[in-house]
Image (cartoon, grey):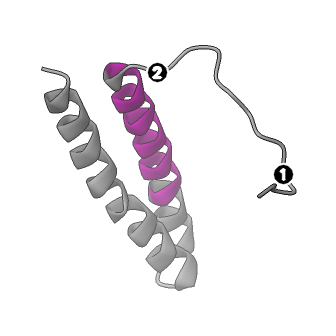
Amino acid sequence: MSEDRPQYQLDTVPTNAEIAERLRAVAHEMRSLGGMMDYVGGMGDLAVRGRLLFYMTLPLMDWAHEIEGEAK
């Protein structure tokens, strides 16, 4: 069975610590953007979506912590 999209292969396999670090970096960016959206959005939809984006970072931080724990 073939797929239409090309198959990519990593040169190196990332470690659990690297994955956790990237999750935290993504969470940091999401929190920053969510805070900006909340601030600029006042009481409108943009603010609500900003708060949602901010709170969606909580699972990412949990996953990063769990992934680091698996490596030990």
Q: Quadrant of residue 25?
A: top left
Disc on res. 21: none
Residue density around tag 1, few if under 14, some if 14–19, many if 20 or more, within 10 Å: few
Residue 69 visible: yes
Give x and y (percent) for residue 36.
52, 56
Of residues 25 and 69, the one nearer the viewer is 69
Residue extent of the magenta highlight: 17-34
Residue position marked by numbered label 1 in the rendering: 5
Is residue 32 depicted above or below 22 in this figure? below
- Which residue is found at the position 48% from the left and 63% from the top? 39
Task: Work out which residue is located at the far right of the displayed protein and give it.
Answer: 4
The residue nearer to you, when weighing 1 against 60, is 1
| Mark 2 residue crowding within 10 angstroms, few (<14) / some (14–19) / many (20+) | few
Amino acid bearing label 1: Arg
Question: Residue at label 2?
Answer: 14
Q: Is residue 33 magenta?
A: yes
Identity, as a three-letter code, of the amino acid under mark 2: Pro
Pointer 2 or 1: first along the chain: 1
Residue 13 percent location from the top left of the image: 50, 20
Q: Nearer the viewer, mark 2 or mark 1?
A: 1
62 to the left or right of 25: left
Q: Main secondary structure of the magenta part?
A: helix
68 or 35, nearer to the observer: 68
Image quadrant in which the C terminus is located: top left
